[in-house]
Image (tube, grey):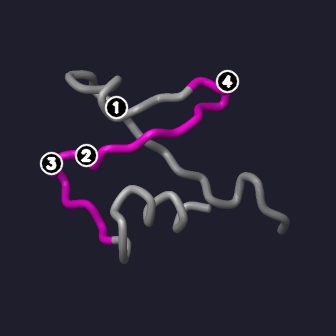
Amino acid sequence: MLLTLLRRLIKGTPKMLEVGSPCPEFSVVDSDGNTVTSADLVGKRTVLWFYPRASTPG
Protein backbone atom coordinates (compact mmCIF):
# COMPACT_ATOMS: atom_id res chain seq x y z
CA MET A 1 0.00 0.00 0.00
CA LEU A 2 2.75 2.46 0.94
CA LEU A 3 4.78 1.51 -2.12
CA THR A 4 1.73 2.06 -4.32
CA LEU A 5 1.14 5.48 -2.78
CA LEU A 6 4.77 6.46 -3.22
CA ARG A 7 4.72 5.33 -6.85
CA ARG A 8 1.63 7.46 -7.44
CA LEU A 9 3.31 10.42 -5.77
CA ILE A 10 6.61 10.10 -7.57
CA LYS A 11 5.57 8.40 -10.85
CA GLY A 12 8.34 5.82 -11.00
CA THR A 13 10.82 4.30 -8.62
CA PRO A 14 10.20 5.65 -5.11
CA LYS A 15 13.00 7.82 -3.74
CA MET A 16 13.54 9.02 -0.21
CA LEU A 17 12.72 12.67 0.34
CA GLU A 18 15.49 14.80 1.77
CA VAL A 19 14.83 16.83 4.92
CA GLY A 20 13.54 20.25 3.88
CA SER A 21 12.70 19.23 0.32
CA PRO A 22 9.37 20.35 -1.11
CA CYS A 23 6.48 17.95 -0.79
CA PRO A 24 5.38 16.23 -3.99
CA GLU A 25 1.78 16.89 -5.03
CA PHE A 26 -0.61 14.29 -3.64
CA SER A 27 -4.23 13.53 -2.91
CA VAL A 28 -5.24 11.04 -0.20
CA VAL A 29 -8.34 10.08 1.75
CA ASP A 30 -8.06 10.58 5.51
CA SER A 31 -9.50 8.33 8.22
CA ASP A 32 -12.79 10.27 8.11
CA GLY A 33 -13.21 9.78 4.34
CA ASN A 34 -12.24 13.37 3.43
CA THR A 35 -9.89 14.02 0.52
CA VAL A 36 -6.77 15.97 1.49
CA THR A 37 -4.34 17.36 -1.07
CA SER A 38 -0.88 18.79 -0.72
CA ALA A 39 -2.33 22.15 -1.77
CA ASP A 40 -4.60 22.08 1.32
CA LEU A 41 -1.51 21.95 3.52
CA VAL A 42 0.55 24.77 2.00
CA GLY A 43 1.85 27.04 4.74
CA LYS A 44 0.92 24.62 7.54
CA ARG A 45 3.25 22.46 9.59
CA THR A 46 2.32 18.92 8.66
CA VAL A 47 3.37 15.43 9.57
CA LEU A 48 2.47 12.84 6.97
CA TRP A 49 2.54 9.47 8.69
CA PHE A 50 2.33 6.11 6.95
CA TYR A 51 1.66 2.92 8.82
CA PRO A 52 1.88 0.22 6.14
CA ARG A 53 0.87 -2.69 8.37
CA ALA A 54 -2.35 -1.08 9.60
CA SER A 55 -4.60 -2.86 7.10
CA THR A 56 -2.59 -6.02 6.49
CA PRO A 57 -2.69 -9.43 8.09
CA GLY A 58 0.11 -10.39 10.45
Q: Quadrant of residue 37?
A: top left
* Residue 48 rendering spot, x and y as whole percentages: 42, 41
Query: Which residue occupies the extreme right position in the image?
Result: 57
Q: Nearer the viewer, mark 4 or mark 1?
A: 4
Which residue is tagged 2?
23
Q: Which badge, 2 or 1, comes first in the chain's sequence?
A: 2
Magenta stretch, main secondary structure class: loop
State the image coordinates of residue 41 (x, y, percent, origin top left): 32, 26
Label 2 to label 4: alpha-carbon separation: 23 Å
Residue at the disc numbered 1? 46
Mark 4 to mark 1 CA distance (whole Å):
17 Å
- Identify the residue at horizontal 44%, vertical 59% (top origin): 8
Left or right: 41 in relation to 30? left
Q: Amino acid at mark 1?
A: Thr
Q: Quadrant of the C terminus?
A: bottom right
Horizontally, is 22 left or right of 27 in the view? left
Secondary element at image label 4: loop
What's drawn in magenta, residue-wise? Answer: 15-34
* Amino acid type of the residue that numbered disc 4 sits on in the rendered structure: Asp
Q: In the picture, which quadrant includes the N terminus?
A: bottom right
The disc, 2 or 4, on the residue closer to the chain's N-terminal end is: 2
Above or below, 47 relative to 12: above
Q: Which residue is mark 4?
A: 32
